[in-house]
Amino acid sequence: MRGRRRRSPRLTTRPRRATVLGPDELVGGVDLTPAPGSPAAVDHDKVLAHPRRYTATATLAAAAGVVVPIVVIALLARVAAKVPWPDMPWPSIGRRGQSARREDEDPANRG
């Protein structure tokens, strides 16, 4: 593949806004305007044209990012509980260094 650049998947989105803060500023600052015709300018124009839709979309996306994984995990847990898993003969493990008793060594079974 000569002349092409392979792109790795992104884990985050592009920055949508840039603000310059002074040395003593924590909030406020000066917003930088994107270059005309750039993808950032198109996004900025959409935000200014429909600010409530932009806020609603961002809020719903954030809520879905929390709720959807919880629902998926709950559904997988329900499916896993209904699967007829094979019965495994797990060994019994004693407490605090004591060896595990076998059934034939149990005093209640002596007779």
Image (cartoon, helix red, strand yellow):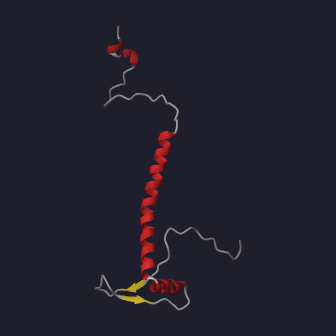
Q: Quadrant of residue 6?
A: bottom right
**Residue at (36, 13) in percent of width and height:** 109
Q: Is residue 78 above or below residue 48?
A: above
Q: Position of residue 101 (x, y in %)?
A: 36, 21
**Residue at (48, 28) in percent of width and height:** 89
Q: Is residue 88 above or below residue 18?
A: above
- Residue found at the very far bottom of the displayed protein: 36
Q: Quadrant of residue 107?
A: top left
Q: Position of residue 13 (x, y in %)?
A: 49, 73
Q: Quadrant of residue 28?
A: bottom left
Q: Is residue 23 above or below residue 10?
A: below
**Residue at (50, 77) in percent of width and height:** 14
Q: Quadrant of the N terminus?
A: bottom right
Horizontal side, residue 9 vs residue 81: left or right: right
Q: Nearer the viewer, residue 93 or 29?
A: 29
Q: Quadrant of the C terminus?
A: top left
Q: Nearer the viewer, residue 77 or 32?
A: 77
Q: Position of residue 90 (x, y in %)?
A: 45, 30
- Residue found at the very far left of the displayed protein: 24
- Residue found at the very far top of the displayed protein: 111
Q: Is residue 103 above or below residue 26?
A: above
User: How many marks can you see?
Assistant: 0
